[in-house]
Amino acid sequence: MTGLLWNLLVGPDAQSLVPAPFGNAEVDGLPQLIMRFFAWTAVWVLLWYILSCTQPLWGSVVAPSEKPHENDRYWMVRNLIGVIHAFFVAAIAIPALLALSRAPDDVRFAASSHLETCAMDPDFYPGENWGMHIEAVALAGLAFTAFTTADVVLSMLHGLATVDYMVHHAAFILAGLLLRGNCMLPWKGSVQLAMEASTPFLNIMLFYQNRGAVYRLLVILCGTVFVASYVYFRLIQNTYATALLWLRGNTAFPSGMPRWEMWLAIVACTAGAAVQFFWFPAIVRTLFKATLSRIDKREAYNEHFMTQGHGNQFTSLVNQRHHVVA
């Protein structure tokens, strides 16, 4: 079955296409990796349409947005599935990041020739759990790359894609394919995957920011956590890891890896880091405008309260008290 699918996907002579960046080590598991990639992609597509079909049920429990496009079925689905995906990836990546950040360089920049799961050889630091964290990064990386690929296609199909969105996704798909496809740079991979920790708070904030004052506290809380996590994971941590990749490019990549592929990985990671800085000013402006808008609405409500209904009653009571005192 595996051999048949392998021949259908890439042809019977595809073994010659397998990258050999591991010196004399024999690379294995590429057919299984490709099958896992398509399986993960199918999972995300299936989940997208399950959420889409059930949107009238779960979408009815929240107030409608003041912005018509935010009531669109597919806009709501993309926000929700983004939260699910980000929680899943970050929950795996952050523990691995914490562990690998204190690992020696030959662990942080390790590579495996077993492409299916990126399992390390038995003699790789026996008694330590570095291999477990490397496999965790590989799992999260595969799920992330498959999700991002599916998200590009689904967003284009349903009119949700923008130019900056496509550039962001293209950079991370390329980086994901190179890092995960070569089972290399587990620490750098964990850094990039941990950036998803900020995504749920952004999506929740965007989902509820125009749905009424009842969600105001939730929006402010999510916005604050989002900015803090964005600055740390996406601007500070990711920039540091990318700079380190430039500085240690000659030793960080597997021996025997073609230099063009090494530089392609560096450029993809750098583009992924650069787009975070490109987005940040717009994010701050959006949050600032949203805050000002809520303040303006609150002041307008207070003015209305003071000049209509209860406000007139309050003024009348003040006037009566003034006459009594006089």
Image (spheres, grey):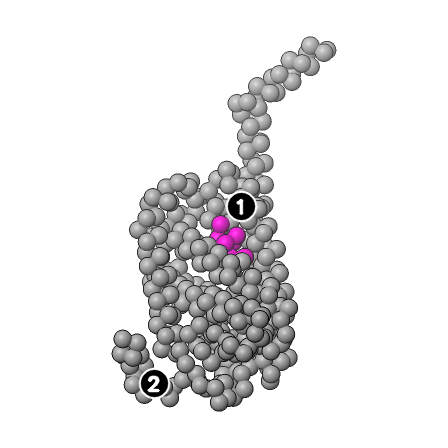
Q: Which quadrant of the figure contains the C terminus?
A: top right
Q: Is residue 192 visible?
A: no
User: Where on the picture, by quarter, is residue 236?
Assistant: bottom right
Using the image, determine if residue 172 lies above or below residue 92.
Answer: below
Q: Quadrant of residue 188?
A: bottom right
> How many marks do you count on the picture?
2
- Residue lying at 38% horizontally and 53% vertically, measured from the top left: 77
Q: Quadrant of residue 249?
A: bottom right
Q: Which residue is mark 2?
A: 14
Local secondary structure at mark 2:
helix
Picture residue at 40% right of the left edge, 51% below the top: 76
Residue 202, position as x, y percentages in the image = 52, 54
* Magenta span main SS: helix
Q: Which residue is mark 1?
A: 219
> Is 278 covered by the magenta stretch?
no
Q: Which percent across, then down, holds residue 123?
A: 54, 78
Q: Residues within 10 Å of mark 1 (few under 14, many from 20)?
A: many
Most foreground residue, 112 or 194: 112
Residue 49 on image: x %, y %: 32, 56
Q: Amino acid at mark 2?
A: Ala
Q: Amino acid at mark 1?
A: Val
Q: Residue at x 38, y 70 (%)?
A: 37
- Left or right, residue 15 beside residue 120: left
Residue 147 relative to residue 282: left or right: left
- Which of labels 1 and 2 is toward the front? 2
